Amino acid sequence: MSESSPMNRRQNQTNMAVRLCDVASLLRSGSWAPEPWTGQVIAAMETQLSNGPTCNNTSNGPSTISNNCSSPVESGSIEDSKTNLIVNYLPQNMTQEELKSLFGSIGEIESCKLVRDKITGQSLGYGFVNYVDPKDAEKAINTLNGLRLQTKTIKVSYARPSSASIRDANLYVSGLPKTMTQKELEQLFSQYGRIITSRILVDQVTGVSRGVGFIRFDRRVEAEEAIKGLNCQKPPGATEPITVKFANNPSQKTSQALLSQLYQSPNRRYPGPLAQQAQRFRLDNLLNMAYGVKSRFSPMAIDGVTSLAGINIPGHAGTGWCIFVYNLAPDADESILWQMFGPFGAVTNVKVIRDFNTNKCKGFGFVTMTNYDEAAVAIASLNGYRLGDRVLQVSFKTNKTHKA
DNA sequence: TATTATT
């Protein structure tokens, strides 16, 4: 994949940073459909893309999204890297390449790693991005922290220097009073050390606390002290004691979790045709992941076309599904494509085609999406979408190159 | 009674 030249990129960075900041803050404040194929996506996007600059910090994502860890001024230690970032709350299906592609839109990346389970290969939902230039790292925090991707709100912050002392510092807390807020939970635990994240789990329907939560400390010794001091103790005003222990390690989740997904009834939610198609492909992907099998439901078999190498299948480029986006404005940049297509699923690459001399967008661009079903929904949703004063044309890229 | 923050 060819990148835009460093010079082009540098020229665009200032504008993009501003816009991404605006959009990201709107993303944080706006309601967002958890399922990309509901009509709410478009409504939400209208709000995001057409509103003027607003910088509020309301968040409907992880409430620790802007905690006070690792701000540039605070990182006093000389060990602290000013280029290395940790990215949390990544969508499950996001790959390392997608991570690199997204953060590479800010500046040159020295290295990038998506952390995966050693056994299952499943993404653990976080990764590291190390920039060449500390300014780009700072810019990435300012512009991408709080970005909504699919159902997740990603968190971008400086990575602490890696050490054994910060591992296994995550606590699971149960028996909490249902009335206890996250702030109160933090107040209770903060006497034992620096809290990195906190969360109270809530009922998805009612939003009421389930009385359980997590506290991640900066260091394991702090977590140990919190267990000693708070396990089996009653919080102020509570009638029952709480339980505090180390949280289960996510890596003990075996392939059973994967298999259980396979046997879930696909028709439980009575989905429409589009969602049925999407689920069929998801199942296919799961089978593929678990057993390395391509079933007859493979995207390669869609429309009854069977092909060995993807020849004659529109938009299929081997590494994903290439989407053609036409009627972009001259000042369009990559960030607008990320913003439009990201909510629909895994996006591996975006590119705005620019004039070599003027560096202005020539009116079109390309987006590569990993999964057929997500690409199809994105196209169906975005074709005809009004962006500013232009109506976009969105389709799978064809191989036809005839010049009229 | 369980989300995914240290390569």
Image: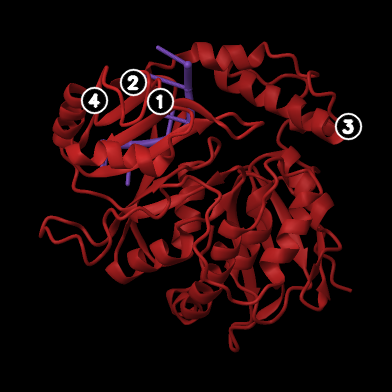
Chain colours: A red, B purple
Q: Earlier in the sequence, mark 1 or mark 2?
A: 1
Q: Cα distance, mark 3 to mark 4?
A: 51 Å
**In front of the other: A28 or A4:** A28
Q: Residue reaching furthest bottom? A: A358
Q: Which residue is mark 2?
A: A242
Q: Residue at x 51, y 69 (%)?
A: A21
Q: Which mark is residue A176?
A: 1
Query: Is residue A397 at all visible to an observer of this figure?
Result: no
Quarter location, residue A250: top left
- Callout 1 touching callout 3 (CB < 8 Å): no
Q: Earlier in the sequence, mark 2 or mark 3?
A: 2
Query: Is residue A154 at all visible to an observer of this figure?
Result: yes
Give, as a three-letter code, the residue at label 1: Leu
Q: Quadrant of the N terminus of chain A?
A: bottom right
Q: Cα distance, mark 1 to mark 2?
A: 6 Å
- Callout 1 touching callout 2 (CB < 8 Å): yes
Q: Do badges 2 and 4 share one subunit?
A: yes
Q: Residue at x 34, y 66 (%)?
A: A138
Nearest-to-viewer mark from 2 and 3: 2
Neighbor class of circle 2 (other Cα within 10 Å; few <14, some 14-19, many 20+) is: some
Does dot 3 land on a helix, a strand or a loop?
A: helix
Give, as a three-letter code, the residue at label 2: Ile
Above-or-below relation of A103 to A233: below
Q: Which mark is residue A230?
A: 4
Q: Cα distance, mark 2 to mark 3?
A: 47 Å
**What percent of the width, then of the height, locates residue A13?**
47, 76
